[in-house]
Amino acid sequence: MRVVYLADAPYIHTQRWVRHFADLGWDAHVISFRPAEIPGVTVHHIDGLESIGKARYVVHARRVRSLIERLQPDLLHALHLTSYGFLAGLSGFQPSIVSVWGTDVLEAPYLTPLHRWITKHALARAGAITATGKRLAEATRPFVPPGKPVHVVPYGIDLEMFDPGESKEQRTKDKQGTTVVVGAVSRLSPEKGFEYLLRAVAALWERRIDISVILGGDGPSRADLERLADELRLREQVEFAGELAHEDVPATLARFDIFAMPSTWEGFGVSALEASAMRLPVVASNIHGIPDVIVHGETGLLVPAGDVPALTDALGMLAADPELRHRMGVAGRAFVRREYRWQDNARLMEDLYAEMVAKRR
């Protein structure tokens, strides 16, 4: 059985899905506008005309369609709606699946009438549609033809990889009376809201709460965040850990006492689930897909996006109460095990693959 993915090959969530099905014995191919090596998978890099940006998806559409026709897959799966999903629609190949992942439906359709048309075109021509969370599925349905379902298939968390072990409980007890570490692992870009996190931490220092910050990741906002840390006199309290390989994320999360996700846009919030799996309480914005992955008052605290005083109070509450942090962390890992275990979520996609291939036959 052969599956062809239209997807960004270097992206970790592309690689997770692709490698999962390759490990199941599928002959997996990825057609990508960025190069990457994926063990056990054939990556076809579509290069050229990088200077024209997103327009090259349309310019190269015939080339992509010819490649799909030559590969003759049993299934075509596009990951991300308004780029690779649009290409899947232009290819005309069936059976096909388009997976919606976040801003591709929360933001893109509202940019211009053309973006809205691209969104509806891609979804109308998809054989099946998946979304990573319930709220993202609801946001997708207005652009879907009547009667066509949107399947909820989350990313899922590997609980063996994200395992805090027994040392987490002892570390929580040992942290009483010492510096509390609040951290995040994410791309450092404006929509992640880390400006608000730094301002909240500065306010906590004014309350004489001993708290520090670790930001794992890199991106266009890093220089601005470094300048803000200097302006807030937090430079000694903020560590910029830089870009992290996915396999290094658990070790970084193990250094945290609280995980923060103060985003202004977030389609799902898989990093919050990774933190919960590591028994960390999460403070996050009550926006878009985030409430799908955090149970307010049980596994973490939700606050209005961009509300620095509310974020400050939530972080202060957890910083002052090690027992509350422990209870929320334990509840968070149980929640992930119950709702977002990788093997269970992957099985949903396996079933959808089987259904689509059976329909073709």
Image: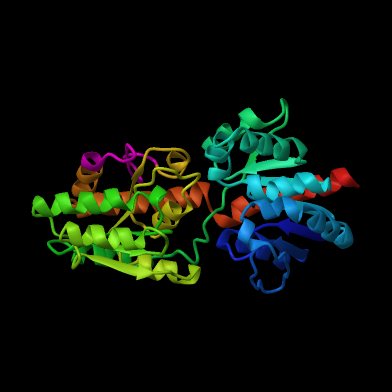
Q: Estimate the x, y position of residue 156 in percent, counting from the top left.
A: 55, 53
Toward the viewer: 44 or 283?
44
Residue 47 in view, yes or no: yes
- Residue beneath the point at 41% across and 64% down: 218
Say if 292 sits above or below 218 in the image: above
Tally of numbered tags: 0
| Quadrant occupied by the N terminus | bottom right
- Stretch of the chain drawn in magenta: 295-310
- In this picture, residue 315 sits left or right of residue 139: left
- In this picture, residue 222 sits left or right of residue 208: right
221 drawn magenta: no
- Residue beneath the point at 85% across and 46% down: 358
Q: Estimate the x, y position of residue 259 in percent, counting from the top left.
A: 33, 55
Residue 70, quarter of the rendered image? bottom right
Residue 179, quarter of the rendered image? bottom left
- Residue beneath the point at 75% across and 48% down: 88
Residue 219, quarter of the rendered image? bottom left
Q: Which residue, as the protein is rendered here, is positioned at the far right?
A: 361
Toward the viewer: 157 or 168?
157
Residue 181 in view, yes or no: no
301 drawn magenta: yes
Say if 353 sits above or below 26 in the image: above
- Residue beneath the point at 44% across and 55% down: 271
Q: Estimate the x, y position of residue 3 in percent, counting from the top left.
A: 78, 58
Q: Estimate the x, y position of residue 208 in percent, counting from the top left.
A: 8, 54
